[in-house]
Amino acid sequence: MILLFFSGWWVACTDCSDCLPFEDEPYVTVRFLNPADSSFHYIIVHTVNGIPASDLRHFSDTTYQYKFPLNMHADSSLFALTYSDTASGSPLQNAVITSWYSRQYVRRPDNFIVVQCLLNSLTTDLGPLYLKCKSNPDSTCISNEATATIYF
Amino acid sequence: MKPLLPFIFSLLLLGNHCRAQDSLQTVGARQTYAFLYADYGKGIESLFNKQSKWELATGINLAGKWRINLEFGSGNLNPANVINNGNYNAHGYYYRGGVDYVFTIKPGRTLATGIMYAASRFDDSGYAEIQSELWDDLQVGFTRSNLTAAWMEWILHTEGPVFHKDNGIWHNFYWGIRGRLRFLLTPIKQPDFDIYAIPGYGKTFSRVVPAANFFLSYRFNLK
């Protein structure tokens, strides 16, 4: 009986209902694609809302993909960009990307409370935008799993 | 820490066993008695962290075989590592009721197993700060009242005399350990933030959690 009790005690281990790959804050991945040659090396974002893009933790200067942090205080985020066009060599230009989403709080397995955003849509004045979710291609998904491809 | 628990438990059982062997006249081998007990472990624990807890119990042992238990307690829990980028508090009261079957191992020393039903009513609150690279950091807090939870417990209980006296007031003092395996019956999901701790149950990291009470009891002979 004692062994049975302790075996039951032993199996009382941690389980986790929120075991997803959360980051510290919600973001959406944006990449810029040249439709002519499918090159990523086309747009370089210089600033996002006045902050140098290279200061963002998720900036990737090798693949030219940008992870824009979403505003956790509202159900939408507006990113005002300055960018340069490497193909044309044009000077800095302005563009806007806007995203809409709903927010929820989750506790990660490391017991940090974070915000998770369920992405509804993204728009931009740069060109055609296609949103793709890793796990749920045809519907809304967690923003951290979504990639927006802008053909420019 | 977890692998040490059975080892510590076994040592305490063994110690209790050895002490009880020469105490042949202690109360309760086949007698009916009432008892009161206090959990001194919770008092000691409260000295070393920010949590405050107390627990008292009473009951009756019928002919040394069946013991009916009623337990009452309070907890003001500030469990560590529940929200690592903030804090969490749960405070409230709880009760438990159940029955044990008692085995007399040696005169004065018993081992018992049983089940209990438990319920808690409590309030909780929490706070978290989430940093952002691009936007203002987010501070979020919550406060909830009149939460309830219920669970069942499987009990493994052992006790023995504190003093090796054959008579007088001292020979009715007992101490021991009450091991528990708790099975949560009610959901912990809440809008936005779950319930992370329940007074009387502990942290809700699992729907099955172990616990132990270190208690001091006093017996009142009824016949």
Image: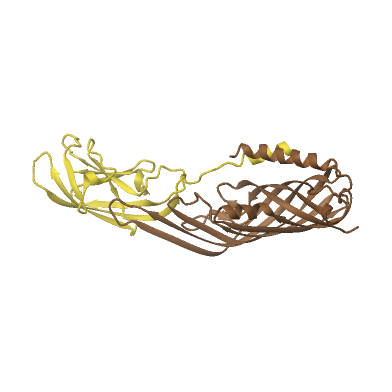
Chain colours: A yellow, B brown
The percent coordinates of residue B124 (x first, y second) are: 53, 61
Report whether residue A7 is seen.
Answer: no
Vertical comparison of B105 with B167: above or below: above
Vertical comparison of B21 with B32: above or below: above
Report whether residue B74 is seen.
Answer: yes
The percent coordinates of residue B72 (x first, y second) are: 69, 60
The N terminus of chain B lies in which quarter of the figure? Answer: top right
- Residue B46 sits in quarter: bottom right
The percent coordinates of residue B164 (x first, y second) are: 83, 47
Vertical comparison of B48 with A8: above or below: below
Q: Is residue B9 left or right of residue A42?
A: right
Query: Which residue occupies 79% across, 39% down?
Result: B18
Query: Which residue occupies 19% across, 49% down?
Result: A47
The percent coordinates of residue B111 (x first, y second) are: 79, 44
**Number of numbered tags placed on the structure image:** 0
Query: Which residue occupies 69% across, 54% down?
Result: B39
Residue extending farthest right? B223
Q: Is residue A13 left or right of residue B84?
A: right
Q: Nearer the viewer, residue B76 or A69?
A: B76
The C terminus of chain B lies in which quarter of the figure? Answer: bottom right
Query: Which residue occupies 64% across, 54% down?
Result: B42
Q: Is residue B173 left or right of residue A49?
A: right
